[in-house]
Image (cartoon, helix red, strand yellow):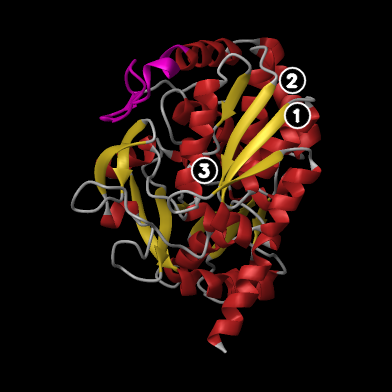
Amino acid sequence: MTGLPLSNSHGRFGKFGGQYVPETLIQPLVDLEKAFFLAQSDVEFKKEFASLLADFVGRETPLYLAERLSQAFGKNIKIYLKREDLAHTGAHKINNALGQVLLAKKMGKTRIIAETGAGQHGVATAAAAARYGMKCVVYMGADDIARQGPNVRRMRIFGAEVKAVTTGSRTLKDAVSEAMRDWVTHVDSSAYVLGSALGPHPYPLMVREFQSVIGDEARRQILAKEGRLPDEVIACVGGGSNAIGIFQAFLQDESVALTGVEAGGSGKALGMHAARFQGGCPGVFQGTATYLLQDQDGQIASTQSISAGLDYAAAGPEHSDLFERGRVQYLSVGDQEALAAFHVLSQQEGILPALESSHALAYALQRAAQLPANSIVIVNLSGRGDKDLDIVEAAAQVRK
């Protein structure tokens, strides 16, 4: 964990963040913040967490030079992949899930609540809860359940109860709302393990800190391999946990460009994408002030992406601050570009990327063609694509 402070003492990143929640959740959030900050200085907590990352998750994950992919661009361009797909349960989500479940255990909680979109956070939380013998319930939109069947089965095998959310858009947005409703009524026994750098303080900070291991490793690894920092670091951004995790180690290095890639979906009209920084504006949603997509009446807009993990109306508050400060550029990639990148990496390197990660990869392939000679790029390969094979195959049938 980086131990980096917030920009002020009120749970904010610039003007974003905060705690916009019912009064009944204020004290649980205060208790959670206190427990988290105590854990940061608790030698035993840090020792147990480090042991879990090494022996349960399998860290550190490799920084892999995609040689065939790189050679296609000439000019000695090097594209490195931070292989979070090789972490236990298949994505970066396990880093944060373990940290929060361990914290819940230390706080005396016996039940874990989680939400999930693509299912990777749900799987990671179910695995972490099983590791500690805790009950686990995961809320998941009914539409996401239909398109992420393999992950639903994995959650249930780990012993979690998966509850389908049939209200609203039937996706991640509504799953978060249901999980928070559950927490409100069970705060004494239950802990809400939020999966991305979203929600009321201290969640964006906690998730950032538990995911900062990605950036810490990547920085150390690239210096060992190349003797210098990369020219650019690229990550997909849904809520933004994998991106903030890898960006964190490079934020103070002005020579390193940082790029977050959102879901461009199937078009530019509202409701056809999830590009908050290109089609959204500041507002308050699910406990935090951040950039989000809303209609002219201020209602939360529907979103669309081939990737369930990016199909969300808001970005994390720290990303909103980084966007307004200009430290990170945020772009979008459409469904078809992401699908093409999925196939390129699979066929060129023998690696199946998650459709979320494929968005970052698609931009990296576009960017590599423009870079000067001897440039180095790191793409955070946030998860593996086994879960997405049905979606990819269905898309191929539609194109036929």
Q: Which residues are magenta?
A: 7-27
Type of amino acid under label 1: Leu
Q: Residues within 10 Å of mark 1 (few under 14, many from 20)?
A: some
Type of amino acid under label 3: Ala
Choose mark 2 or mark 3, whichever is in front. 3
Question: Cα distance, mark 1 to mark 2?
Answer: 6 Å
Residue at mark 2: 48
Question: Cα distance, mark 2 to mark 3?
Answer: 30 Å
Residue at image coords 37%, 45%: 314
User: Dots 1 and 2: beta carbons under 8 Å?
Assistant: yes
Measuring from the top left, give residue 20's x and y in whole percent: 34, 26
Report the front residue among 215 and 344: 344
Residue at image coords 45%, 46%: 173
- Quadrant (top left, top right, bottom left, bottom right) of the N terminus: top right
Q: Residues within 10 Å of mark 2 (few under 14, many from 20)?
A: few
Which secondary structure lies at badge 2? helix
Above or below residue 205? Residue 161 is below
Q: Is residue 32 left or right of residue 97?
A: left
Above or below residue 227? Residue 336 is below
Above or below residue 316? Residue 296 is below
Residue at mark 1: 52
Which secondary structure lies at badge 3? helix
Magenta run includes residue 208: no
State the mark number for residue 175.
3
